[in-house]
Amino acid sequence: MAEIVNLRTARKRAARQAKEKDAAENRRRHGLSAAERQRERDVLTREAHRLDGHFRGEPPEGEEKP
């Protein structure tokens, strides 16, 4: 005997799988997630501040102090 399938849930399952496939393609296409991009920005900012903290003396003419 055949398995009884609720068509509404089958359509929803198929739609979720299609959305997940599209999402995976977009993740591959666009690279890093927002959290990864933010973490990278935070690391670069922290490194820049640390480097600026070690600055000694006056900057050359025409440049502003970091």
Image: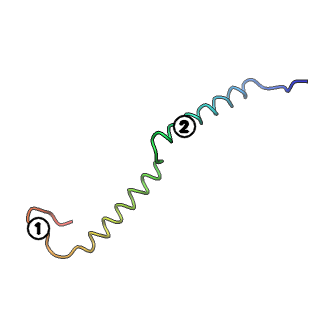
Residue 64: percent from the left, percent from the top?
15, 63
Residue type beneath disc 1: Pro
- Tell me the SS state at disc 2: helix
The residue located at (55%, 39%) in the rendering is 24
Task: Check the image and report above or below for 44 versus 15.
Answer: below
**Quarter occupied by residue 42:** bottom left
Question: In the picture provided, is 7 more to the left or to the right than 64?
Answer: right
**Quarter of the figure with the N terminus:** top right
Question: In the picture provided, is 19 more to the left or to the right than 4?
Answer: left
**Quarter occupied by residue 23:** top right
Tell me, for residue 18, which label it has, or none.
none
Q: CA distance from mark 2 to mark 1?
A: 50 Å
Q: Residues within 10 Å of mark 1 (few under 14, many from 20)?
A: few
Label 1, on which residue? Answer: 60
Task: Check the image and report above or below for 1 versus 60.
Answer: above
Residue type beneath disc 2: Ala
- Tell me the SS state at disc 1: loop
The residue located at (59%, 35%) in the rendering is 21
Residue 18: percent from the left, percent from the top?
61, 31
Label 2, on which residue? Answer: 23
